[in-house]
Amino acid sequence: MRFLLVIWLICCGVAAAAQDVLIIGDSMLSIHQKKDGGIEEIITRETGLSVEILASAGAPVVPAKGAKRLLSGKPVIQQLGERDAPIVVVNGGANDLALQCRCGECGPTLEGILSSDSGGALGTLMRDLRDRGSKVFLVGYYAWAPGGRAYEGCRTYLEELDRRMVETANRLEGVTYVSTREAIDPENPEHFKADGIHPSLVGAGRIGQVLAAAMVR
């Protein structure tokens, strides 16, 4: 796999990077970092690729304004900075919906995250990463457990966000949508932390397996 990646880099004219894979996003991807059985360890084990997670808990896609900035992590669109990698994994949007519009009337917030024509902050990021030579994996959200009520009002918007992610991946060459819905079973408590929202170490490992499979496909 690593040999094939090097050939791909040469063909695409991409400079060598410190890591093969950089992961940006929110706590769905940042949780259980550097743990045996966590996302990066599973990807490395399955593919031989080196992985670094830059995602952070509470991260919105779009930078929050005013006092809300104190409640949020580093915005997804700012997490890479000037860094590049052959592969970039991205998720995000749930914190924007919870923080900016409190899972209420979130149509304008959703448009700012990812519009119906693949614009918005995520759409712009996808195009920028693709133009920089990265292969992008855009990761959708799974369904939370029955006890995970914090985002209940966001369900309709998250489902629409997921649909737009699929359409964006279909529109943009170099962008692949990755579903986590089959990896995380909402009825299986072993897949979740006690809050019913964040993945347990078992759940994180299953997300890592889905991502690894997508990278070698």
Image: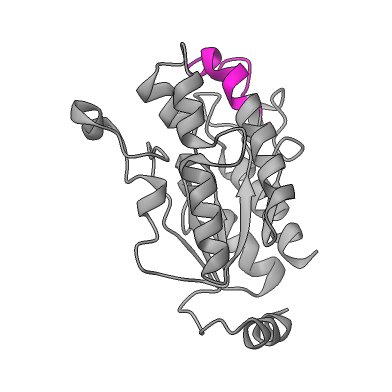
Count of number-bearing discs:
0
Residue 191 % position (x, y): 64, 34
Q: Is residue 97 magenta?
A: no
- How far across and how far down the image is residue 141, in percent? 62, 35
As rendered, which of 22 and 194 lies closer to the eye?
A: 22
Residue beneath the point at 60% across and 55% down: 37
Residue at (73, 78) in percent of width and height = 1
Res 36 visible: no
Residue drawn 62% across the image and 38% down it: 117
Across and down, in percent, residue 56 comes to: 39, 46
Residue positioned most to the front: 117
| Stretch of the chain drawn in magenta | 143-158
Snapshot quadrant of residue 126: bottom right
Q: Residue 150's x, y, as percent? A: 47, 17
Q: Is residue 202 visible?
A: yes
Q: In this view, does 36 lie to the left or right of 33?
A: right
Give the image's coloring scheme.
Answer: one colour
Between 19 and 188, the residue placed more toward the observer is: 19
Horizontally, residue 22 falls left or right of residue 180, namely left
Q: Is residue 77 left or right of residue 125?
A: left
Name which quarter of the figure residue 36 lies in: bottom right
Q: In this view, does 198 lie above or below 39?
A: above
Q: Residue furthest right?
A: 217
View extreme (left): residue: 67
Quarter of the image containing the C terminus?
bottom right
